[in-house]
């Protein structure tokens, strides 16, 4: 057991910023890697010669990172944050180097999985470490920085991916991680020394970890590939559904019977955790509708380049920074948090409704800015607040596992959201293309190849297809508005607990001692 003084240490602002700078680099790498690959996928397929396996470059990373997120959280509770974070950074860098050296699509997919094994820990552990050094009441001051990192990665990922692919080579989208990772390792080697070192005799739930990874891998494969690469009624998809549900049942049964479960189920008996995680999952779906499909709309409808389309997210990014930073400061002053995600989700629902109902929007005009800035503000008010609420509601013993559960549901929701929105868009586009007499192009082909799917169409046919795409995106954004409303309703049930301050933590430590 860790001593009470270490468990309830109070950090100065200077110490907090040293810690924050190290974990922020790790967080930036993980967040950016979710988007930087997208713009380079067609070039990778051309160089490595395997278009049909291209989606697995994204899926392999997604499966590995999502399934390992809760495991990292629990391991950090058992072994200490510093050691586990540095293992995650090392794995991520090894995977990055191997991806840059890949000579075939099979190798690239395998190495992306290794990279994902490290990436699963970077985000969750960064949030957990911030929870270690900053009391919930004061944590709002740092939410602007967190929101800024997410916003920066949302734009920097596609932009750097496009620039490296067009000016250098796609290998650089992986090599850019090396200086960032080296700096993160160096900065965390000293900054994290005061964090809890872990428990004296940790016990690892190996079976629980294996069951969780198997469950997530099976079910994420289903939502990412069903209806796209394989029919929903195919034996593979149906078999994986059954296998995933069976492993989920065994996992839940097993976790109730072990001393140190990977995902402590008692956490979900805490009302805040039970509500916050579903809110995070649905809100992540809403968030990724904008991050992934607004640039794609720009490319398909307006014909912009991948690099230019990334710049068009800047108004939304600005809004996210303003929402996270402004909301965080208000939380620190008031000690209340529930009103902020409610306001944010309501604002996001209205803005997505405007995107869905409006005619073709000028991608760089005032109308677009008037929608995307408030949309970003709304989304910026949700995710960081839910993390603060969960960390405030649980014991320090479970801080890593609880924070990782938020990261797990965020990643799971984002993954499912991208797949669902893609399936809805592809089905809507396919039906409209057939009705318009353009059977030579499919919705699935558009989702996999992007603007290059239009290359062989005559000008008149391309114009018709672009009109069809605009209708498809309208349907997608209306669905996002509906999901924002669902998340709003779920948030109404969020219990608001008083936010602990640094003084409260010190007092609790004195009482324990």
Image (cartoon, rainbow, N blue to C red):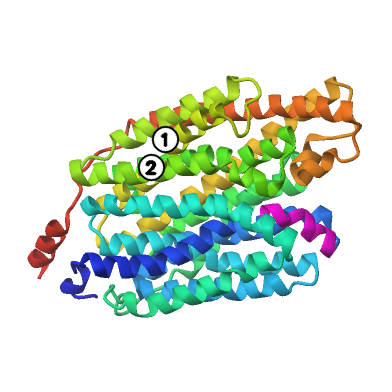
Span of residues in magenta: 37-48
Q: Residue at x 63, y 39 (%)?
A: 293
Q: In which quarter of the image is the C terminus?
A: bottom left
Mark 2: give few (<14), some (14-19) or many (20+) Cα within 10 Å.
many
Is the residue 285 above or below the residue 396 in the image? above
On the image, the x and y values in percent for residue 485 come to: 45, 27
Q: Distance between the residues labelled 2 and 1?
A: 9 Å
Residue drawn where x is 54% and y is 23% of the image = 354
Give the numbered dot on residue 322. Answer: 2
Whether residue 257 is visible here, answered yes or no, is: no
Q: Position of residue 368 (x, y in %)?
A: 56, 30
Query: Is 473 on the left-hand or right-hand side of 210?
Result: right
Front: mark 2 or 1: 2
Q: What element carries label 2?
A: helix
- Residue 67 sits in quarter: bottom right
Residue bearing the label numbered 1: 378
């Amino acid at each position: 057991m860790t001593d009470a003084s270490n468990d309830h240490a109070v950090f100065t602002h200077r110490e907090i910023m040293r810690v924050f700078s190290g974990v922020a680099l790790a967080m930036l790498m993980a967040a950016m890697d979710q988007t930087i690959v997208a713009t380079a996928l067609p070039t990778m397929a051309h160089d490595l010669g395997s278009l049909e396996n291209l989606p697995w470059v994204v899926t392999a990373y997604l499966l590995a990172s999502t399934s390992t997120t809760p495991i990292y959280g629990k391991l950090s509770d058992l072994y200490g944050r510093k050691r586990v974070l540095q293992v995650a950074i090392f794995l991520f860098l090894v995977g990055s180097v191997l991806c840059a050296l890949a000579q075939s699509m099979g190798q690239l997919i395998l190495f992306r999985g290794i990279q994902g094994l490290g990436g699963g820990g970077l985000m969750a552990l960064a949030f957990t470490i911030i929870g270690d050094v900053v009391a919930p009441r004061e944590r709002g001051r740092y939410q602007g920085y967190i929101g800024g990192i997410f916003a920066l990665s949302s734009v920097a990922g596609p932009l750097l991916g496009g620039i490296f692919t067009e000016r250098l080579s796609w290998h650089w989208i992986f090599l850019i991680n090396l200086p960032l990772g080296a700096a993160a390792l160096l900065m965390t080697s000293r900054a994290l020394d005061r964090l809890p070192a872990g428990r004296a005799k940790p016990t690892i739930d190996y079976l629980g970890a294996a069951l969780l990874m198997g469950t997530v891998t099976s079910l994420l494969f289903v939502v990412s590939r069903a209806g796209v690469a394989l029919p929903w009624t195919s034996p593979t998809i149906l078999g994986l559904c059954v296998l995933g549900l069976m492993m989920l049942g065994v996992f839940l049964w097993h976790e109730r019977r072990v001393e140190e479960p990977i995902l402590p189920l008692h956490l979900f008996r805490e009302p805040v955790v039970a509500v916050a995680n579903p809110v995070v999952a649905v809100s992540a779906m809403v968030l990724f509708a904008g991050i992934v499909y607004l640039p794609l709309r720009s490319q398909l409808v307006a014909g912009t380049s991948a690099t230019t389309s990334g710049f068009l997210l800047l108004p939304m990014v600005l809004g996210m920074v303003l929402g996270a930073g402004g909301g965080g400061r208000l939380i620190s002053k008031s000690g209340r948090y529930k009103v902020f995600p409610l306001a944010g989700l309501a604002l996001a629902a209205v803005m997505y409704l405007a995107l869905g109902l409006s005619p073709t929007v000028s991608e760089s005009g005032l109308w677009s800015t008037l929608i995307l800035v408030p949309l970003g503000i709304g989304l910026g008010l949700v995710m960081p607040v839910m993390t603060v609420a969960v960390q405030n509601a649980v014991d320090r013993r479970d801080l890593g596992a609880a924070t990782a559960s938020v990261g797990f549901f965020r990643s799971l929701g984002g993954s499912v959201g991208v797949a669902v929105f893609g399936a809805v868009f592809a089905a809507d586009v396919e039906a409209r293309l057939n009705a318009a007499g353009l059977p030579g192009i499919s919705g699935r082909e558009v989702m996999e190849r992007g603007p290059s799917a239009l290359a062989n169409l005559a000008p008149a046919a391309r114009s018709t297809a672009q009109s069809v795409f605009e209708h498809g995106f309208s349907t997608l954004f209306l669905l996002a508005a509906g999901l924002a409303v669902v998340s709003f309703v779920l948030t109404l049930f969020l219990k608001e607990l008083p936010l602990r301050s640094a003084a409260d933590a010190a007092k609790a430590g004195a009482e324990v001692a």
